[in-house]
Amino acid sequence: MNSRDEFHTRALQLADGIDSRLITTEAVLIEIGNVLAKLPWRELAVSALNDLRDDGSVEILSVGPDLFSLAPTRWRRSLLAGVLTPRTHGSGFN
């Protein structure tokens, strides 16, 4: 997103090498938008989120009751596998 970032060129090279689809949810994109909503990132965030939405290789899943109801099952599986760990402060998972 930041072309002046020291890792920008490498990130573009890696992105070009990925042939698979990106799958995300509306909730993830909302959180990204919330984090980047402040200046100086706001305009860049809007552009990046619009690009993701318009990109045919990106699948954005709606967070409806069906998807949301799967979350606790996935969290339990991830915890059992040691993938997610409960946060020591606040709520949610790391």
Image (tube, grey):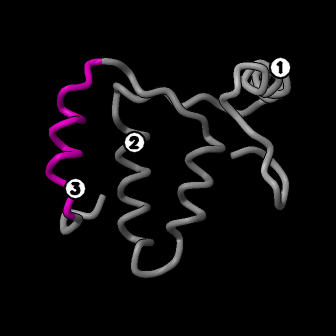
Where 72 falls versus 77 (above or below)? below
Residue under numbered circle 3: 7
Of callouts 3 and 1, which one flags the residue occurring earlier in the amino acid sequence? 3
Question: What x and y, as percent, mark residue 92?
Answer: 80, 47
The quadrant of the image that shows the N terminus is: bottom left
Local crowd size for mark 1, using a 10 Å CA cut-off: few (<14), some (14–19), many (≥20): few
Question: What x and y, as percent, mark residue 60?
Answer: 53, 31
Chief secondary structure of the magenta span? helix
Magenta segment includes 12: yes
Local crowd size for mark 3, using a 10 Å CA cut-off: few (<14), some (14–19), many (≥20): few
Question: What x and y, as percent, mark residue 38?
Answer: 52, 77
Residue nearer the viewer, 43 or 77 = 77
Q: CA distance from mark 3 to mark 2?
A: 20 Å
Q: Is residue 41 left or right of residue 10?
A: right
Q: Quadrant of residue 2?
A: bottom left
Magenta segment:
6-19
In contact (CB < 8 Å): disc 2 and disc 1: no
Q: Secondary structure at mark 1?
A: helix
Q: Secondary structure at mark 2?
A: helix
Q: Quadrant of residue 27?
A: top right
- Amino acid of disc 3: Phe
Where 30 falls versus 13 (above or below)? below
Q: Is residue 22 left or right of residue 30?
A: left
Residue under numbered circle 1: 73
Residue nearer the viewer, 12 or 41 = 12
